[in-house]
Image (cartoon, grey):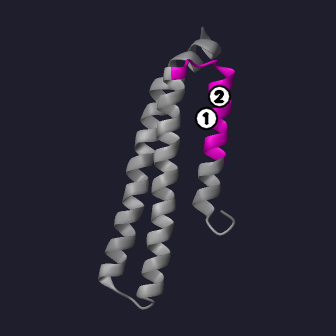
Amino acid sequence: MKHEFHMRVHAAATVVVLLAAVALKLRSEEWLWLLSAVAAVWVTELMNTAIERTVDLASPGESELAKIAKDTAAGAVLVASIYAVAVGSIVLGPPLWEKLFG
């Protein structure tokens, strides 16, 4: 984690989401959705890092195929992050809105 800026961002986001879930006293079903979203982001970020490092090792020079592999792995993280934002909005949005404005 010390070498990857994005992992630190994901760690901070994870802490914020979990603290919000505790503060909002979510039901276990809601926790499952949040945890699945957090896990999806972490799994794809870890795979992305592994793919990037492996590609760097196997192809230290400029390579269009290496670029495509890295971009595709990063795209997987983007998809997982969009999923996490959607889940977070659906699960945390209504109770947070109620707590702040209700």
- Camera-nearest residue between 72 and 53: 53
As drawn, 11 above or below 102: below
Q: Image quadrant for the C terminus?
A: top right
Q: Residue 12: horizontal and vertical position, in percent?
A: 66, 47
Any magenta on residue 41?
Answer: no
In the displayed orientation, state which residue is furthest to the top. 102
At label 2, the amino acid type is: Ala
The span picked out in magenta is: 12-28
> Is residue 56 positioned above or below 86 on the image?
below
Rendering coords of residue 24 (x, y %): 64, 19
- Kind of residue at disc 1: Val
Position of 21 compared to 64: left or right? right
Q: Give the labeled residue for mark 1.
A: 17
Please report contact status of discs 2 and 1: CB closer than 8 Å, yes or no: yes
Residue ID at (60%, 57%): 7
Above or below, 81 against 32 in this view is below
Tag count: 2
Magenta stretch, main secondary structure, is helix
Q: Secondary structure at mark 2?
A: helix
Graded by Cα atoms within 10 Å as few (under 14), some (14 to 19) or many (20 or more), the crowding at tag 2 reads: some
Q: Find residue 25 and report its image quarter.
A: top right
| Residue drawn at 51 percent across, 60 percent down | 46
Q: CA distance from mark 2 to mark 1?
A: 5 Å
Say which of 27 and 8 sits in front: 27
Label 2 sits on residue:
20
Q: Residues within 10 Å of mark 1 (few under 14, many from 20)?
A: some
User: On the image, which quarter does residue 14 sit in?
Assistant: top right
